[in-house]
Amino acid sequence: MTLIDIIAASVWLMLPAYVANPMAAVFGGGMPIDLGKNFKDGRRILGDGKTIRGLVAGTMCGLVIGLIQIGLAPRLAASGVLTGFPIFQSTLAAYSISTILVVGLMALGALLGDSAESFVKRRLNLKRGAMFPVADQLDFVLGAWVLTFIFASVWFKTYFNFWIIVTVLLITPLLHLMANVFGYLIKVKKEPW
Ligand code: CTP
Ligand code: MG
C-alpha cells in the first residue's frame, strides 16, 4: 500500500461524514435541535447553530454520497485502481442493509459529534460560532467513528486500521479548513473556521 492508497482510502472511508458536515451548513436553519431550551446552567443546550433541518439534510446528503460510493466500488475494484486496499473489494462493494447502514451511521455520527461539541462549547460559555480549535476540526470524525464502532464494529475494525486512523486525523483539519474558508467565501458560513 502506497501513501496515495492510504490517503485515498481514508478520504473514501470518511466521505459520507465529510459531506454530511458542510451540507448541514448549506441546508440548515429553522427550528434548533434543542428547541431553544436552556440547560440547567442557564445557557442554551446546543444553541441556534444546530438545527433539525441541518441534522436531517446533512445525514441524507451523506447517505446519498455513501450509496453512490457503494455503487462505484465494484467498478473501481474492477478497473484495478487502488487494488492494494480491501475497501474497494469486499464489504462496501455491494448494496446490502449493512453497508447502507454503515454509510448512514457515518453521516449521522458526524452530525451528532458536531452537536456534542456544541454542547461542550455552550457549557464552556463559548458563543455560537466561537472558535474551539481541534474540537471544531475533529468533532465530526469522532462522532462518525463512535457511532460506527458501536453499531458496525466489525466494519469499523476491518477498515479503520492504525494508519488510516492516523491519516484521517492528520488530513481532516486541513480539509476542514479549506472547506470552511470556501464556505465563508460563498457565504454559507459566517466564520472561516
Ligand atoms: N448547521 C445546522 N444544523 C446542524 C449543524 C450545522 O443548521 N446540525 C448550520 C448552522 O447554520 C451553523 C452552520 O451550519 O451555524 C455552521 O455549523 P457549525 O460551525 O458547526 O456551527 P456554529 O454556528 O459554529 O455553532 P457552534 O458554536 O454551536 O459550533
Ligand atoms: Mg463553528
Image: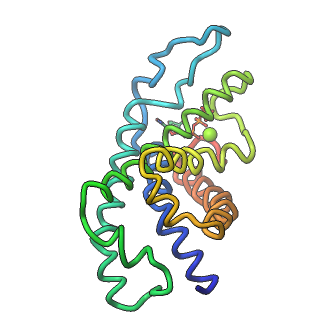
Q: Nearer the viewer, residue 131 or 106?
A: 106
Looking at the image, which residue is at 61% across and 31% down? 118
Compared with 125, 11 (above or below) is below
In this view of the protein, which residue sits in the foreground, 128 or 157?
157
By what rule are the colours in the image chosen?
A: rainbow
Q: Quadrant of residue 124?
A: top right
Query: For the view shown, which residue lies furthest in the front direction?
Result: 154
Q: How many labels does the image show?
A: 0
Does residue 35 lie above or below 137 as drawn? above
Q: Which residue lies furthest to the bottom in this view?
A: 80
Ligand 1 shows up in which quadrant of the image? top right
Image coords of residue 17 (percent x, y): 48, 54
- Which quarter of the image is occupied by the N terminus? bottom right
The answer to which image quadrant residue 135 occupies is: top right
Q: Determine the residue positioned at 35% across, 68% down.
A: 92
Q: Residue at x 31, y 75 (%)?
A: 72
Q: In which quarter of the image is residue 47?
A: top right
From the viewer's perspective, tell me whether residue 88 is left or right of residue 144. Answer: left
Residue 166 on image: x %, y %: 68, 64
Residue 176 image position (x, y, % from top left): 61, 56
Residue nearest the observer in this picture, 130 or 67: 67
Residue at 58%, 54% (x, y): give it.
Answer: 185
